[in-house]
Image (cartoon, rainbow, N blue to C red):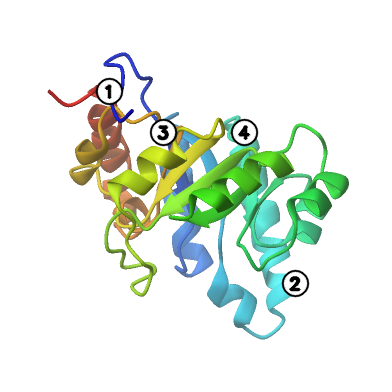
């Protein structure tokens, strides 16, 4: 059951924003998106949201990010906030405590992406599929600097998640070097935050290219 074909398609790179000041963040996003290697972008700006007038600031930031992403034909999802996603006409990624998929489907256009956090729980993956989510996110795959308290899931949990008939996104501590440990699994998205976004802007393009090289070698391990 854990055997995977050597012709498994390579996952796509899914970039999440970090909590850099916006003036620092935006040039990094410009550099990353201009490579043409980013398949999906998530706006996740927890510090902005917690600041004074956070909701208004987040909306202003997100409008600029969405406009940038559109110029590169990269779809965008908003972290946790279906109302803001509707306002921006983008998709949404929902944690388990951040609203229902059915509700998001009612509010968003039918072509918008809806993601669901499922940790390592295959029953949550099944539930996300049955509710009509676009993908289920599983992780943390490795220890993560972004979410240091996140529980690391087993390879078997990930394999079982990949067998549920829904696109799987992996997240948590992923780098262009350790992604090879997942080679051959039928994963749709590899979600990356720190391994790209924590770099200075002049290193972003090279790191995206290193990711492309790593994913181009995607095949079942010998």
Query: Looking at the figure, which quarter contains the C terminus?
Result: top left
Q: Nearer the viewer, mark 1 or mark 4?
A: 1
Q: Nearer the viewer, mark 1 or mark 3?
A: 3
Q: CA distance from mark 2 to mark 1?
A: 40 Å
Front position in the image: 168 or 22: 168
Residue pictured at 59% horizontal, 44% vertical: 126
Label 2 or label 3, whichever comes before in sequence order: 2
Disc 4: CA contacts within 10 A as few (<14), some (14-19) or many (>=20):
few
Disc 2: CA contacts within 10 A as few (<14), some (14-19) or many (>=20):
few
Residue labelled with disc 3: 187
User: What's the mark number on residue 216?
Assistant: 1
Q: Is residue 37 above or below residue 101?
A: above
Q: CA distance from mark 2 to mark 3?
A: 35 Å
Please provide percent x and percent y for residue 97.
Answer: 65, 68
Q: CA distance from mark 2 to mark 4?
A: 23 Å
Q: CA distance from mark 1 to mark 4?
A: 25 Å
Label 1 or label 4, whichever comes before in sequence order: 4
Residue pictured at 72% horizontal, 39% vertical: 132
Q: CA distance from mark 4 to mark 3?
A: 27 Å
Q: CA distance from mark 1 to mark 3?
A: 14 Å
Q: Nearer the viewer, mark 4 or mark 3?
A: 3
Query: Looking at the figure, which quarter contains the N terminus?
Result: top left
Q: Secondary structure at mark 3?
A: loop
Residue labelled with disc 2: 56
Residue pictured at 79% horizontal, 45% vertical: 89
Front position in the image: 120 or 48: 120
Please provide percent x and percent y for residue 63.
Answer: 70, 53
Q: Do we see residue 115 in this rendering? A: yes
Front position in the image: 26 or 158: 158
């Amino acid at each position: 059951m854990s055997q995977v074909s050597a012709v498994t398609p390579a996952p796509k790179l899914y970039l999440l924003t970090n909590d850099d000041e916006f003036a620092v963040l935006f040039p990094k996003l410009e550099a990353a998106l201009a490579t043409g290697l980013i398949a999906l972008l998530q706006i996740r700006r927890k510090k902005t949201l917690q600041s004074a007038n956070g909701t208004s600031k987040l909306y202003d930031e997100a409008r600029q990010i969405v406009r940038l992403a559109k110029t590169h034909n990269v779809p965008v999802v908003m972290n946790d906030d279906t109302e803001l996603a509707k306002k921006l006409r983008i998709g949404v990624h929902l944690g388990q405590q951040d609203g229902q998929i059915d509700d998001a489907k009612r509010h968003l256009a039918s072509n918008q992406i809806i993601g669901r956090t499922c940790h390592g729980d295959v029953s949550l993956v099944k539930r996300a599929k049955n509710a009509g989510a676009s993908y289920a996110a599983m992780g943390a795959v490795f220890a993560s600097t972004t979410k240091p308290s996140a529980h690391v899931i087993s390879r078997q949990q990930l394999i079982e998640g990949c067998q549920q008939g829904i696109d799987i996104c992996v997240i948590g501590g992923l780098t262009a070097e350790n992604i090879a440990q997942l080679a051959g699994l039928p994963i749709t998205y590899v979600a990356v935050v720190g391994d790209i976004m924590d770099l200075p802007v002049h290193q972003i393009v090279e790191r995206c290219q290193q990711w492309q090289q790593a994913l181009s070698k995607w095949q079942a391990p010998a």
